[in-house]
Image (cartoon, rainbow, N blue to C red):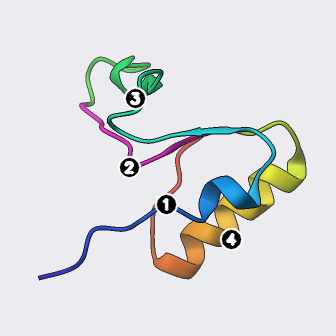
């Protein structure tokens, strides 16, 4: 069994807001493509290229996929 990824440290690495399922403002329920059902483990509202780089690095280090 593979452990579910945790995103606890991700919020500390970016300046933008981060959301996870269960957060009141979690935007993962808003589909941008209704043909594909998704439920992201985290949503990052990046405010800079540095936020994007940190998020991609965080995901890469953990073998997670990233969508933009």
Q: Quadrant of residue 28?
A: top left
Q: Are marks 3 and 1 in contact (CB under 8 Å)?
A: no
Query: Pointer 2: what residue?
Result: 41
Looking at the image, is mark 2 or mark 4 nearer the viewer? 2
Mark 2 to mark 3: distance in Å? 9 Å
Q: Quadrant of residue 55?
A: bottom right
Q: Is residue 5 above or below residue 66?
A: below
Q: Position of residue 5 (x, y in %)?
A: 37, 68
N-terminal of the pair, mark 4 or mark 1, is: 1
Mark 1 to mark 2: distance in Å? 8 Å
Magenta segment includes 34: no
In this rendered view, identify the residue nearer to me: 34 or 51. Answer: 51
Give the structural element (helix, strand or loop) at label 1.
loop
Q: Are marks 1 and 2 in contact (CB under 8 Å)?
A: yes
Q: Residues within 10 Å of mark 4 (few under 14, many from 20)?
A: few
Q: Who's the residue at 38% across and 49% down the image? A: 41
Instruction: State the mark number for residue 7.
Output: 1
N-terminal of the pair, mark 2 or mark 3, is: 3
Magenta segment includes 39: yes
* Magenta-highlighted residues: 37-45
């Amino acid at each position: 069994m593979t452990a579910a990824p945790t995103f606890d440290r991700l919020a500390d690495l970016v300046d933008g807001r981060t959301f996870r399922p269960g957060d009141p403002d979690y935007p993962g329920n808003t589909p941008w493509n209704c043909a594909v059902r998704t439920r992201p483990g985290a949503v990052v509202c990046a405010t800079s290229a540095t936020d994007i780089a940190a998020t991609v690095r965080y995901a890469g280090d953990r073998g997670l996929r990233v969508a933009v």
